[in-house]
Image: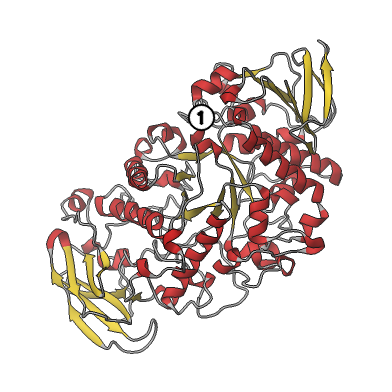
C-alpha cells in the first residue's frame, strides 16, 4: 500500500493530549542487533496495529513476508527477526481504523534506494579497514577551532579538481590531487589551508534528488528524509545500503589522517514533506508544531517545523546526534535553524556528546526563518545561547557589519567604506561577549551581548547562503577595480580571523570563489556551485594571504582567548580613531602569547586614514595582502598618527 494518508481533523490533538502519550526510555528504538539476531522496535502509541513487511529489494516487488508486530511497553511495538535475515523492510500503522503508508521507521540507520525501505543491516558494523583505530585529532580548546564549510559535490566536480570520485564521499579520500599549475586540490587543499574542522553541508539522506538517476542534478540537501542515514547520491552505489555508510566513514577516516576534524550540518528543525514522512504516518501530529487553527506551523519556511520540545522528538534528535558521533566518529555538528529547536533539547545534545568527548564542537543558526508557536524564551536563539554552555551561534552582527546586509546585495559594509558600522564590527571582535568599551545601542542587531564566552560566537562574513564574499563585494561596489575588491576581501576576513571567537570560512573564498552573482544556489547546476581550482592558481597571492592569516591565528593565543574575562582584560579599543576605522590592542602577553602587545588596525575607508597608535617600536606582521609572522618590516612609531592604506588591515607587534 503506497497511498500516503494525511492527518484528518479527527486525529488532531492538543498539547495536553500529546503529553498523555506513553513514552519509551529504552535505548533500542529502531533495528538493533545482538550478534546476527535483529530486533525492530517502533514507537507508535496511537496505532491499533503495526505491520512489518519484508522485501528482497530496496524498491519494487511484492513483500516476501508480512508480520504483525507485538504491542510492548512505552507505546512501542516489537518484532524479532530470524537470525541472519537480509533484505529490506517497511512498517505500516493502522490508526483510527485506517491503514496508513508503508515507511521506514524514524530510527532507521540503513536504507535502500531513495530511502523508501529500511535495510536489514547492522549499520554500526559496516566499517572500512582500520576503522577501530581511527581517532579524533587533538583539540585543546574550542577557540582553537578554524572551520571551513564545503558541499560534498562542490569540492570535486570541476574538471580542474583532478579528483576521480567526482561529487562523492570518496572524493574526499583522494590525496595527491592537483589542479591548474599544480595547485593542491580537494583533501590536500583543505589540509594546506590550515583548517581544524571541515563542515560538510547536509550528508544525511535527503529527498530532493532521485538516487536512481545519477547525473548533473544538484541540491544542498536541506530537505531531510532520514536523520541518521547517509545520502545515497554521494555514494558510489546508492542502491547498496552498506556503500553509503562505509564511504562516509572513509571520508571521516581520511580527514582524520590529515589532522582535520569533521562537522556534519544537521537539519533537525523540519522534514522534507510532513504528510509523507514516517513521523506523520506512524504518530500523526506528534512530531510537528501546529498553529492555533491546526495547520502545520512553519518557522523553517520549508512547510513544517519539528516539535523538539516533545519527549519522543527530543529523544530522537539527541540519540541521532549521539549515533553520528559514536558510530561515524563525527567531531562536530552545525544545527540548521537552531532557533527552532528548544533549549532543553540543545542542553541534552551537549550532555550526550560530553559523555563521548567534550571536545565535539556544536554550533548553529540562532534564528528562525519565520514565526514559531514555541515561545522565544524556550528556543535556542542567539539571545538565549548563554543558557546553553558549549553551544555556539553564528554572529550576523559582524557578518553584515563587515560586508553589508546579507539580502540587500548592493549595500556595502564597513570593509567597503559604509559609515556607522564600527560598533557592529567591534561586537564581533569581542566574540559577542560583554566588553566595557562597547556601545551596544549602536550595534546593528543585538543591543546586548549574547555569548557567555568567545567560544559561543562563530565569526564569518559569508557561508553557503546568499552571495559568496567576492560576488557580494562586486555587487556592492560597482566600478571598483579588481585590486580594490581584493583589498576589501582581504580586510573582511582579516577581521574575521583576528576576532575573538571561532572563525568560519566557506571553502573557495580563500581564492575569490564566484558563483556568478547567484545568491541562492541550492539547486543550481555544478557550473555555478563547483569550486573552480583554476582560481587558486590565478589568485595565488590571495590564497597565500589566507593561508598565512590562518597560520598567524593558530600560532598566537592572543587571538583565541577562551573567556569573556580575558577578552575584557586584554583587549583594549584605542581612542580617537577616525570614522571608518577600528583599532585595538591585545596587551600583556594575552593568553600567554609570546608577543607582549599586538596592535590591530582596520581601515574600512576607500581612502588612506591616519590612525593614532601607542608610541613604540613595532614589527609589522600583516599589511594589506602581505602577512608574515616573522615580520615584514620594523617600525619606530612616535606619537603622530600612522597612515593606513585604503581598505586594509595592519597588525603591529611588540
Q: Quadrant of residue 633?
A: top right
The answer to whether residue 37 of the structure is visible from this angle is yes
Residue 55 percent across, percent down from the top left: 31, 84
The quadrant of the picture occupied by the C terminus is top right
- Give the residue drawn at x 76%, y 19%: 578
- Give the residue drawn at x 73%, y 64%: 178
> In this view, which residue lies farthest toward the top?
639
Q: Nearest the camera: 351 or 383?
A: 351
Labels in figure, total: 1
The answer to whether residue 480 of the structure is visible from this angle is no
Q: In this view, does 124 lie above or below 23?
A: below
Q: In this view, does 87 lie above or below 27?
A: below
- Apparent side of residue 527 relative to residue 180 in the rendered image (left or right): left
Quickly name the residue at label 1: 562
How crowded pointer 1 is (Cα within 10 Å; few <14, some 14-19, many 20+) is rated as many
Residue 43 percent across, percent down from the top left: 22, 63
Residue 14 percent across, percent down from the top left: 22, 51
The quadrant of the picture occupied by the N terminus is bottom left
Residue 113 percent across, percent down from the top left: 44, 78
Amino acid at each position: 500500500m503506497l497511498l500516503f494518508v494525511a492527518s484528518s481533523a479527527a486525529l488532531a490533538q492538543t498539547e495536553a493530549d500529546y503529553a498523555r502519550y506513553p513514552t519509551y526510555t529504552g535505548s533500542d528504538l529502531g533495528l538493533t542487533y545482538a550478534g546476527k539476531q535483529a530486533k525492530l522496535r517502533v514507537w507508535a502509541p496511537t496505532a491499533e496495529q503495526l505491520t512489518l513487511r519484508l522485501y528482497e529489494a530496496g524498491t519494487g516487488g511484492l513483500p516476501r513476508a508480512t508480520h504483525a508486530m507485538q504491542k510492548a511497553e512505552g507505546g512501542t511495538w516489537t518484532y524479532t527477526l530470524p537470525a541472519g535475515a537480509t533484505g529490506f523492510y517497511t512498517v505500516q500503522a493502522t490508526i483510527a481504523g485506517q491503514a496508513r503508508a508503508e515507511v521506514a521507521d524514524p530510527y532507521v540507520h540503513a536504507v535502500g534506494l531513495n530511502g523508501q525501505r529500511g535495510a536489514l543491516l547492522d549499520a554500526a558494523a559496516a566499517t572500512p579497514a582500520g576503522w577501530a583505530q581511527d581517532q579524533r585529532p587533538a583539540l585543546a580548546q574550542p577557540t582553537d577551532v578554524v572551520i571551513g564549510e564545503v558541499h560534498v559535490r562542490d569540492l570535486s566536480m570541476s574538471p580542474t579538481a583532478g579528483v576521480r570520485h567526482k561529487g562523492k564521499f570518496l572524493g574526499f579520500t583522494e590525496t595527491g590531487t592537483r589542479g591548474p599549475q599544480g595547485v593542491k586540490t580537494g583533501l590536500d587543499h583543505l589540509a594546506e589551508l590550515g583548517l581544524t574542522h571541515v563542515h560538510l553541508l547536509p550528508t544525511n539522506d535527503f529527498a530532493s534528488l532521485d538516487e536512481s538517476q545519477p547525473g548533473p542534478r544538484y541540491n544542498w540537501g536541506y530537505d531531510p528524509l532520514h536523520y541518521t542515514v547517509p545520502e545515497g547520491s554521494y555514494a558510489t552505489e546508492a542502491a547498496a545500503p552498506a556503500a553509503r555508510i562505509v564511504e562516509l566513514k572513509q571520508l571521516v577516516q581520511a580527514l582524520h589522517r590529515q589532522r582535520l576534524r569533521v562537522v556534519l550540518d544537521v537539519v533537525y528543525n523540519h522534514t522534507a514533506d510532513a504528510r509523507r514522512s514516517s513521523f506523520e504516518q506512524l504518530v500523526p501530529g506528534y512530531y510537528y508544531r501546529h498553529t492555533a487553527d491546526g495547520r502545520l506551523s512553519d518557522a523553517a519556511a520549508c512547510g513544517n517545523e519539528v516539535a523538539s520540545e516533545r519527549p519522543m522528538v527530543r529523544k530522537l534528535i539527541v540519540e541521532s546526534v549521539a549515533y553520528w558521533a559514536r558510530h561515524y566518529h563525527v567531531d562536530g555538528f552545525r544545527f540548521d535553524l537552531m532557533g527552532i529547536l528548544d533549549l532543553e533539547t540543545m542542553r541534552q545534545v551537549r550532555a550526550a556528546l560530553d559523555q563521548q568527548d567534550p571536545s565535539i564542537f556544536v554550533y548553529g543558526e540562532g534564528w528562525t526563518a519565520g514565526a514559531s508557536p514555541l515561545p522565544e524564551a524556550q528556543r535556542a536563539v542567539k539571545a538565549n545561547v548563554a543558557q546553553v554552555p558549549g553551544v555556539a551561534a553564528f554572529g550576523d552582527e559582524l557578518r553584515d557589519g563587515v560586508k553589508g546586509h546579507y539580502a540587500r546585495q548592493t549595500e556595502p559594509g564597513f570593509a567597503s567604506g559604509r559609515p556607522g558600522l564600527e560598533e557592529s564590527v567591534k561586537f564581533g571582535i569581542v566574540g559577542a561577549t560583554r566588553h566595557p568599551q562597547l556601545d551596544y545601542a549602536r550595534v546593528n542587531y543585538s543591543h546586548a551581548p549574547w555569548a557567555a564566552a568567545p567560544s559561543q560566537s562563530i565569526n564569518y562574513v559569508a557561508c553557503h547562503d546568499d552571495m559568496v564574499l567576492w560576488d557580494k563585494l562586486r555587487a556592492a561596489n560597482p566600478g571598483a577595480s579588481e585590486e580594490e575588491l581584493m583589498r576589501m576581501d582581504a580586510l573582511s576576513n582579516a577581521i574575521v580571523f583576528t576576532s575573538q571567537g571561532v572563525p568560519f570560512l566557506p571553502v573557495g573564498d580563500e581564492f575569490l570563489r564566484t558563483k556568478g552573482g547567484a545568491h541562492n544556489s541550492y539547486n543550481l547546476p555544478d557550473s555555478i556551485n563547483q569550486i573552480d581550482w583554476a582560481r587558486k592558481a590565478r589568485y595565488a597571492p590571495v590564497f597565500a594571504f589566507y593561508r598565512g592569516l590562518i597560520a598567524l591565528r593558530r600560532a598566537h593565543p592572543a587571538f583565541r582567548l577562551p573567556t569573556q574575562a580575558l577578552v575584557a582584560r586584554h583587549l583594549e579599543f584605542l581612542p580617537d580613531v577616525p570614522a571608518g576605522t577600528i583599532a585595538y590592542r591585545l596587551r600583556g602577553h594575552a593568553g600567554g602569547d609570546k608577543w607582549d602587545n599586538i596592535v590591530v588596525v582596520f581601515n574600512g575607508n576607500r581612502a588612506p586614514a591616519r590612525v593614532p597608535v601607542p608610541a613604540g617600536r613595532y614589527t609589522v606582521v600583516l599589511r594589506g595582502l602581505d602577512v608574515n609572522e616573522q615580520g615584514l618590516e620594523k617600525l619606530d612609531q612616535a606619537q603622530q598618527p600612522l597612515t593606513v592604506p585604503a581598505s586594509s588591515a595592519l597588525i603591529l607587534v611588540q
